[in-house]
Image (spheres, rainbow, N blue to C red):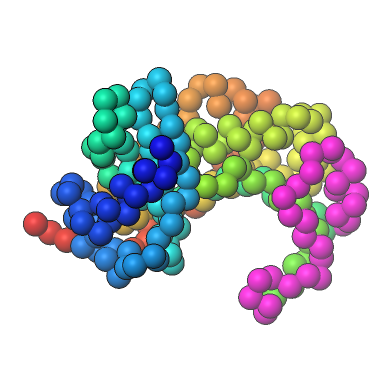
Amino acid sequence: MKEKIKQLVKRELINPTLEMTKQILDVLQIELVEDSFRIERIDIDDEKKEVTAYVNIRRTDFYLEFIFNIADSIDLYSVDTKPFIEISFFPTSETLTVDELQKLTKVQPHRKINKGEYFSNRKFQYNYNGLEYLSAKGPGNITFKINSLLDLLETDIIGIKELSSQTECSNLFVTISYHVGNGNFTGLWLEKEIINRLAKFDFELTFDIYAEGEKFKDE
């Protein structure tokens, strides 16, 4: 099934049949030559009889989403862009060492920052120590992303709350990168269950939202 979906995605990108695909490729055609795209993930929903494939485009953060109906045959019925979303919890301290921060919780971070280390640009040094916890990688809406991070942090609620208290960090940082498309950015809401989960930690949300790429061409 997945191999067949990959072939159909490639066929649609080379010889588009949907108007939305054509509109997208009008502004992304330089990015989508030969093998300059790859399948990021394929999700199969047996209940809905749907398969969703996400294509990651080089030099961009957002995704192309291909949805197929598989009730009878495999039919492509939707192509659209989907934003890149990442949620992070990044407690830092100028006084506590990384080891001291880590001892406050049993949850292992995705990354540790030591004071004096250089930023990736090699021009500046960190003036603090920190632990970074991230949501699940790859495509996903804000509900999926926040829940994936909270699933991790809830394995040690007491420890994470102590880490938050000791570092005075109560923010989850939400980074969202849309394709600029037609300038209409939707799909952001928080379910009551998520708000209740955030309240366990007294967490706040800080949003960093931006758009990249070319706008769709006027008809």
- Residue 162 placement: quadrant: top right
Q: Is residue 117 shown left or right of residue 146?
A: right
Q: Magenta segment: does it hold 58?
A: no
Magenta span: chief secondary structure: loop
**Quadrant of the drawing holding the C terminus:** bottom left
Q: Is residue 18 shown left or right of residue 140?
A: left
Q: From what the image shows, is residue 158 above or below residue 111?
A: above
The one nearer the camera, 38 or 108, is: 38
Q: From what the image shows, is residue 6 above or below residue 157?
A: below
Residue 81 seen by the camera: no
- Residue 134, position as x, y percentages in the image: 64, 46
- Residue 60 placement: quadrant: bottom left
- Residue 63, position as x, y percentages in the image: 40, 51
Q: Identify which residue is drawn at 66% across, 31% down.
A: 151
- Residue 116, position as x, y percentages in the image: 81, 70
Q: Is residue 106 shown left or right of residue 126?
A: right
Residue 121 seen by the camera: yes
Q: Identify which residue is drawn at 79% across, 39% down.
A: 107
- Part of the protein shown in magenta: 95-123
The one nearer the camera, 23 or 196, is: 23
Q: From what the image shows, is residue 24 above or below residue 198?
A: below
- Residue 83, position as x, y percentages in the image: 41, 48
Q: Identify which residue is drawn at 51% across, 22% down.
A: 192
The one nearer the camera, 112 or 8, is: 8
Q: Identify which residue is drawn at 54% across, 38% down.
A: 145
- Residue 58 placement: quadrant: bottom left
